[in-house]
Image: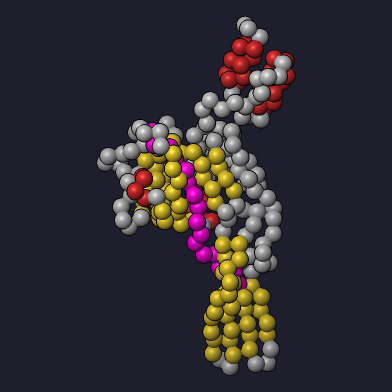
């Protein structure tokens, strides 16, 4: 079976659900059918339902130099807003767009936003006759949540992993499972209104041409 995506994960919670050992390290693989598994020898398959990451977290590091001596200290963490998001139902919509990843049925929610503390990855230097002080933003690991459905038992559950910007760039390339039997259009509306709404969904690439044609034929009794 062909592996189309893979990423090494550090599991913070829920490792027992996916069969990862006590170390918490496991490689998540996705096959050509979109199913996820972690153990190659005796694979248990999961549908990949949702991925949520609240955005990278940064520490402010202060470096001081005085009279030929230097010291470094950290300040409180600050969170970068506007790069957080959610991938659900194969969809990525928002400030980041990665073509060819999944079917657009959910949303990747993001915004421009602002830092709680300005100057991401920037440095500020204060120079005086006695000392030089430099501040810079350093990213530290944070947490992301992945939700799965066991194909065999139909159990849905979530795990938490250690995540940062680089890991996030890997994970958003995994294809999430398109929800089944999802009601996209209110069937209490007239058949013409329903066709219009299905056409809008088709134009947004939320449903395929085949799905639109099928629904149209059903509504027109063709």
Where is residue 97? Give x, y as percent. 61, 43
- The answer to whether 166 is drawn above or below residue 184 in the figure is below
Residue 220 part of the magenta segment: no
| Residue at position x 45%, y 46% in the image | 158
Viewer-proximal residue among 54 and 4: 54
Percent coordinates x, y for residue 131 in the rendering: 63, 89
Q: Which colour scheme is used?
A: secondary structure
Q: Left of 42 or right of it: where is 192? A: right
Q: In which quarter of the image is the N terminus?
A: top left
Most common SS among magenta residues: strand
* Residue located at (51% from left, 41% from top): 50
Q: Position of residue 181 (x, y in %)?
A: 53, 25
Can residue 2 be seen from the camera position used here? no
Q: Quadrant of residue 196?
A: top right
Q: Which residue lies furthest to the front in this view?
A: 188
The quarter holding residue 122 reads bottom right
* Relative side of 7 to 70, left or right: left
Where's the C terminus, which quadrant? Answer: top right
Magenta residues, start to end: 136-151
The residue depicted at 60 percent of the width and 43 percent of the height is 108
Asked whether 44 or 132 is in front, the reply is 44
**Residue 16 makes an appearance in the image:** yes
Q: Across the whole image, how many numbered discs are drawn on residues?
A: 0
Image side of residue 102 versus residue 38, left or right: right
- Residue 221 in the image: state x and y as whole percent: 63, 7
Outermost residue toward the top in this view: 222
The one of 15 and 188 positioned closer to us in this rendering: 188
Residue depicted at x 40% and y 33%: 154
């Amino acid at each position: 079976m062909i592996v189309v995506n893979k990423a090494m994960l550090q599991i913070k919670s829920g490792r027992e659900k996916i069969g990862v050992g006590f170390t918490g390290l496991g490689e998540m693989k996705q096959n050509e059918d979109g199913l996820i598994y972690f153990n190659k020898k005796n694979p248990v398959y999961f549908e990949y339902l949702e991925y949520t990451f609240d955005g990278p977290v940064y520490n402010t590091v202060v470096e001081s130099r005085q009279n030929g001596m230097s010291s470094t200290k950290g300040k409180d963490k600050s969170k970068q807003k506007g790069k957080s998001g959610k991938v659900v139902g194969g969809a990525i919509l928002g400030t980041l767009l990665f073509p060819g990843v999944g079917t657009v049925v959910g949303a990747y929610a993001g915004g421009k936003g602002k830092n709680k503390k300005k100057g991401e990855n920037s440095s500020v230097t204060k120079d005086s006759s006695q000392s030089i002080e430099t501040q810079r933003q350093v990213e530290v690991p944070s947490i992301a949540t992945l939700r799965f459905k066991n194909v065999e038992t139909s159990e849905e559950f979530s795990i938490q992993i250690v995540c940062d910007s680089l890991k996030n760039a890997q994970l958003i390339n995994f294809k999430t499972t398109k929800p089944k039997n999802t009601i996209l259009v209110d069937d209490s509306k007239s058949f013409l209104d329903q066709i219009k709404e299905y056409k809008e969904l088709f134009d947004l690439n939320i449903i395929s041409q085949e799905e639109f044609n099928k629904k149209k034929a059903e509504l027109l009794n063709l």
